[in-house]
Image (cartoon, rainbow, N blue to C red):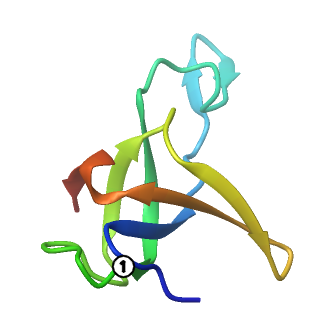
Amino acid sequence: MQAVNYYLVIEKIKQKPTKIGGLELTEDITENRYDKGKVISAGNLVQGVKSGDIIFYDKHTGNTMQKDDKSYQIITVKEVVLIE
């Protein structure tokens, strides 16, 4: 699977649940605006991000794609806010 142009194929990294006062909060409930993911494929026009990088990106962006029973997020490079 190869991304083209300014697109990235991301595999989302599941965040550990947060415990507050004995309650376990999942990532959907916490107010974190960004998701963490591993870049599977970077398009030919993408600069500064490469396959294998761990990134943070806006969780309300992109589209989900299913392939081989795995879920991938397709985003543009402008949605990346941090490279770990």
Q: Residue 80: in sight, yes or no?
A: no
* Image quadrant occupied by the C terminus: bottom left
Q: Residue 37: in sight, yes or no?
A: yes
Which residue is located at x 51 percent, y 32 percent? Answer: 60
Element under disc 1:
strand
State the residue lying farthest toward the front: 5
Which residue is located at x 35 percent, y 79 percent? Answer: 43
Position of residue 31 relative to residue 46, above or below, is: above
- Estimate the x, y position of residue 42 in percent, counting from the top left: 36, 79
Position of residue 78 relative to residue 47, above or below, is: above
Q: Which residue carries the number 1 mark?
A: 42
Which residue is located at x 47 percent, y 18 percent? Answer: 31
Q: Viewer-proximal residue, 26 or 5?
A: 5
The amino acid pointed to by label 1 is Ala
- Estimate the x, y position of residue 41 in percent, counting from the top left: 44, 82
- Estimate the x, y position of residue 9 in percent, counting from the top left: 50, 70
Q: Viewer-proximal residue, 61 or 28?
A: 61
